[in-house]
Image (cartoon, rainbow, N blue to C red):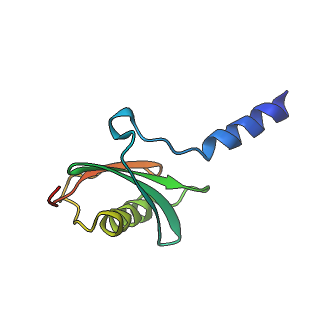
Amino acid sequence: MHRFAALAALALAGCSAPSPYFHGARIGVVETGGMRFTVYRRADEVEVHRRGGGIPRERDVLLGAIRAIEIATGCPVRPRSMKGDQGVVTAEIDCPV
């Protein structure tokens, strides 16, 4: 039974679903800085999910998320708008819709 629970946890860890506000807003998957991110955009807001295992430093993830947002949207991240952790980051962008 413990083996099944461990396998189920691993399978769920690989899933990346946006928060309800971002459902249907997927832009795509971007790889940068050795990490892979899924970027979701709705108007001038984005939600970024880091995919893959390991726990890199938070600074590395945030820098990677900024780059992934810029690649996926073509827009700069609004200063001081980022919030999140090593798994999920939200931010605002300065970009026409």
Please report the residue visible at 72 percent of the width from the left and 35 percent of the height from the top. 8
**Residue lying furthest bottom in this view?**
33
User: In which quarter of the view is residue 74 placed?
Assistant: bottom left
Name the outermost residue toward the top. 1
Image quadrant where residue 95 sits:
bottom left
**Residue 90 in picture, x, y percent from top left:** 32, 48
- Please state which of residues 94 and 86 is positioned toward the viewer in this rendering: 94
Q: Is residue 51 above or below residue 73?
A: above
Q: Residue at x 85, y 27 (%)?
A: 1
Q: Give the tally of numbered discs.
A: 0
Q: Name the spot of residue 32 as percent of width and height, x first.
A: 46, 71
**Quadrant placement of the C terminus:** bottom left
Q: Position of residue 75 (x, y in %)?
A: 23, 65
Write the residue at 39% across / 42% down. Answer: 24
- Vertical arrangement, residue 36 with respect to residue 46, above or below: below
Q: Is residue 47 above or below residue 36?
A: above
Q: Residue at x 82, y 30 (%)?
A: 2
Q: Is residue 12 left or right of residue 70?
A: right
Place of residue 44 in the rendered image (x, y in percent of width and height, measured from the top left): 20, 51
Q: Is residue 94 left or right of residue 31?
A: left
Depth order, front residue of 15/42: 42
